[in-house]
Image: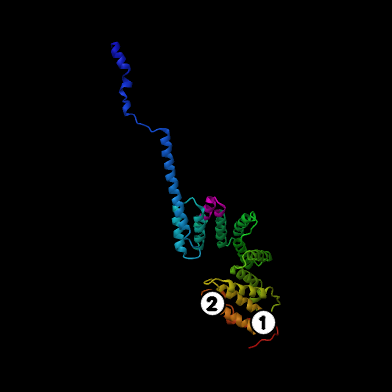
Amino acid sequence: MTEKEASKSDSGIGDSINLGCMPNFPPIWALKTILLMLLLCLATGFTTKKEDYDKLIGQVEISKNQDKSLEICNQAIALRPDISKGYSLRCILLGNRNEFKSAMLDCKKSIQNALQPEELYLSYIANGYLYERLQDYDKAIEYYQKVNEMFSQKNRPDPSVNHLLGQIYYRKYKTHHKQADFDNALKYLNLSNSINPNNWLNYHLRGALYTQLNAYILRPSTEAPPFTPIFVDEAIDDLNKAFQLAPKGAQISKNYSFRSRAYTIKYLVTCEKSYVDKALSDEKTAIELEPEEQTYKILSDPKAYNNIKDICIKRKRNYHQ
């Protein structure tokens, strides 16, 4: 090989690369611009999804058209599965349908995804509500108290959660008849009422609580056991106030039923026929509004009615035929 050939051979590799065919990379500043545009597009899409999500969530109505609301929640969660609120709302809706296993999964996700205090608030409410539906009242109280702790840090109690706590302690008292549960129910209902005195449900529930305190008086008995009714007038006053404040379309059948019982207790104390007439009228109205509810039927049962009359007779009070 000649020197000329060797020289040509040594430069063969370099000569075989056509530098004109090399890709023409854009400068660094252009790359940064492209990357920024891509991020902007992604962020815009993400923001649009959030806006669509918020519109869907805004259409959810927990107390109305629950099937449609559940479908809307499903759409919202599919759009943004990282946001807590959809899971909280779906947890409540599924709990109302007694689909407790699925509801529990949603409640857990609602806590995991909660980033803002408002999201955590709704998540605790949903979890408390679900455990209340499961009749695990102590666990429900635990979650509702978490909400109270959040508000106590701001030195302003929340009327909604105090009403819910009053409701749970009322149900515990109704089941176990423990004085501590009655005291706690009254405490939280009074607190809720002091914050929001126009909530008819506070008066309804407190009137029911007072009536329940005297429920043993209405138990079937052939004797006339001694009793000292407590808060009967207060019960009637609260139930009357609930009627005054209840919005149009509110479910007031239970209010009629409890006032009927309160009037019945009042009759057993005084043996004045006007009270039993009022009790019969309220019970009739409650049954008309909700005919499938068997617990409303007390005085309409002839045996129960005769038993109540006999109690007054045995007390040797004035009874007018």
Residue 223 showing in the rendered view: no
Q: Reading the chain from its start, which is encountered first: label 1 or label 2? A: 2
Q: Is residue 12 left or right of 34 when viewed as pictured?
A: left
Look at the magenta stretch and give its main secondary structure.
Answer: helix
Q: Quadrant of residue 305?
A: bottom right
Residue 242 belongs to magenta span: no
- The image's colour scheme reads rainbow
Give the structural element (helix, strand or loop) at label 1: helix
Q: Which residues are magenta?
A: 106-119
Q: Which residue is mark 2?
A: 287
Quarter of the image containing the N terminus? top left
Residue 122 showing in the rendered view: yes
Q: Which residue is mark 1?
A: 311
Q: How many marks?
A: 2
Q: Is residue 293 left or right of 261 when viewed as pictured?
A: left
Q: Examine the rendered structure and indicate whether residue 202 appears above or below residue 7.
A: below
**Residue nearer the viewer, 236 or 134:** 236
Question: Tag 2: Cα neighbours inside 10 Å, few (<14), some, or many (≥20)?
Answer: many
Question: Tag 1: Cα neighbours inside 10 Å, few (<14), some, or many (≥20)?
Answer: some
Q: Is residue 30 left or right of 201 when viewed as pictured?
A: left
Q: Examine the rendered structure and indicate whether residue 183 appears above or below residue 29.
A: below
Q: Examine the rendered structure and indicate whether residue 19 appears above or below residue 100.
A: above
